[in-house]
Amino acid sequence: MVAAAVAGRRLDWPHASIHVPGASSPHALSLLSYWDGVWYRTIAERGYLLIPGRQSDPAFFPLFPIALRALHGLGFSFLTAGIVMANGALIVGIVAFYELGRRVVSADVAETSALLAAFFPMSFVFSMTYPESLVLAALALSLLWALSGRWTLSALAGAAAALGRPEAMFFALPLAAIAVATGRTGRAAPGRAIGAALAPIASVATFPLYLGWAIKNVSAWSLAQSAWGRSFELNGIVRAVHQLHHPGTNPWLWRDACLCVIYLGLIAAARRLGLSWPWLLAGAAIVLLPLATGTFMSDARFGLLALPAYWGLGALTRRRAVRLPLLILSAGLLVAGTLTIPLATP
Amino acid sequence: MASSDSSIESAGRRSGRRRFAVASGSIAAGLAAALAGATFGLQAVTLPRPSPGQLMAAKTMRWLTRHDAVESVKIVHQRPVSSLCVNAVVGPLRGSGPPGRVHGSLLITPHARLLDTRFAAFRVGRTLREEDGAAPSIQAVLAGCPRALERRIGGLLDDRVPVGVKRILRGGEQLVRLAFARRDRGLFLIVALRTFAPVAVRIARGRTGWTSLAPAERRDLVAPSLRLSRRLRLVVKEDV
């Protein structure tokens, strides 16, 4: 994937002079810092500011910029810091997800799922200067530590995940389910267990409070989201479907719509593994809730954090005859996905 | 005797369970609150904050997004010259114009009518004639055109240009002078402290003086000068 990013940059692909945020950097791996990566860097460098009437940065959660700033303080450039951190977190995330899988599903499904998560066609986002890999690592560790009864660590990791992407708070559901299940066995510290389940929600709530303090606007996040064309409405999913057929609509939306359907199908397949409903609900909410803002845009990326989807894929590819071709296909699509970064925001 | 013992025992168990529930709830709430405090503190300590001047400029941006028309007066050769600027929708245009329909500003001065968009500026006559150079967009900014001013201030805020703040008192009204310190695109703005409405604007470059600004009244918007030829109305529409 990194090689594809370097190749894409060297070949000066695509040749058309389309404007891509971040494309002006001469760095060999700058392909991995395009689009929202520019916004995360701006926040790390200059902080938040809501600018009415135009797209502005309070739409982005603060964990990744905070981490970027910390690494930049050690002497790395923002771009290098972002790429090192995203890819380091990806390795931690995949290992933690494998360990989590061994406790939730069978060992063979856990192994296949972790492998497919790393080679999933959209997984190039995990290598980009985006928060997804940090959130994957924090989420997997939070759930893993909860299953081991290490509630304080679980709470810390859960809070970190939700500070990276708000969707992480949906995993409060499986965390609560784990707390209840361990409570029944009588080996739980119920207070800390419930606290761990509440941690992601508490963490998400601090972001608007911070914006209220720093830029004097508690609603800055939702106002900035509207400027990006996202606003929660009851008929949001209907609007999202209609948007697909509007004349002049970005054709890449179909990639997001197709992957949305695939994620939901895989989560449904995960049911066959006996996964309890809080896990399935959390996964489905991650995929479906962004649609309530009236667009499929980036749903393919948001769905990367729907962990049960990978277990569903693992369950469907238990047989080696299916697994190997799928892995090869997935890896090919992953390289293709990396090369198409300049063409469409993931 | 036995039944009284068992009722005492079950009451004790109930109160023990209640104590346990209260203790667990307190620990849960305490842990969540401690983490919320820590995450808030982390953001507060690590991330830079905008300056008061940048926040005031952002509030002026909000005022501009909520207004469709502004009238302005500037002194030229010791005489007041007024102009009116309204938000407009333009397009589709042929030739090198912007694709599709775009938002812009229609500026009416005593001498000319000008159309300013993100992509290009046009002199409005019987047809639209594209204007070269930065002068038309500077003219639109100086006339307080909401969209042109929004674009200029927004660009400066995107780059987090330092904004100096100085309180002034004019005609008994508390005003604030905002100075966007940028060598090539500096801007001075006087805004009302209460509403953040722009009251006057000046561009640092060149020898331009202050232009006084005020939101346009409804009667101004039906002025004959705003009426365009039928042909032009197909491509330029007021957006009020």
Image (cartoon, coloured by chain):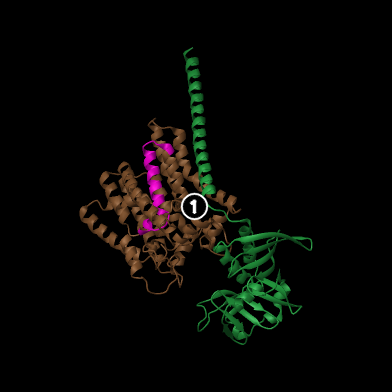
Q: Residue furthest right?
A: B171
Residue at 51% in and 62% down: A228
Q: Which chain is green?
A: B
Residue A285 visible here: yes
Residue B18 image point, x, y percent: 51, 28
* Residue A12 or residue A313, whichever sits in front: A12
Query: What secondary structure characterizes most of the magenta part?
Result: helix
Residue A317 image point, x, y percent: 26, 53
Q: Residues within 10 Å of mark 1 (few under 14, many from 20)?
A: many
SS type, badge 1: loop
Magenta segment: does it hold A118?
A: no
Magenta segment: does it hold A147?
A: yes
| In this rendering, position of residue B81 left or right of residue A36 | right
Residue A269 visible here: no
* Residue B127 or residue A92, whichever sits in front: A92
Q: Which chain is brown?
A: A
Residue A35 image point, x, y percent: 44, 63
Q: Residue furthest top?
A: B1
Bounds of the magenta segment: A124-152
Residue A149 image point, x, y percent: 38, 36
Instruction: Determine which quarter of the picture holds residue B195.
Output: bottom right
Say if B137 sits above or below A149 in the image: below
Which residue was labeled with disc 1? A62
Residue at 48% in and 57% down: A292
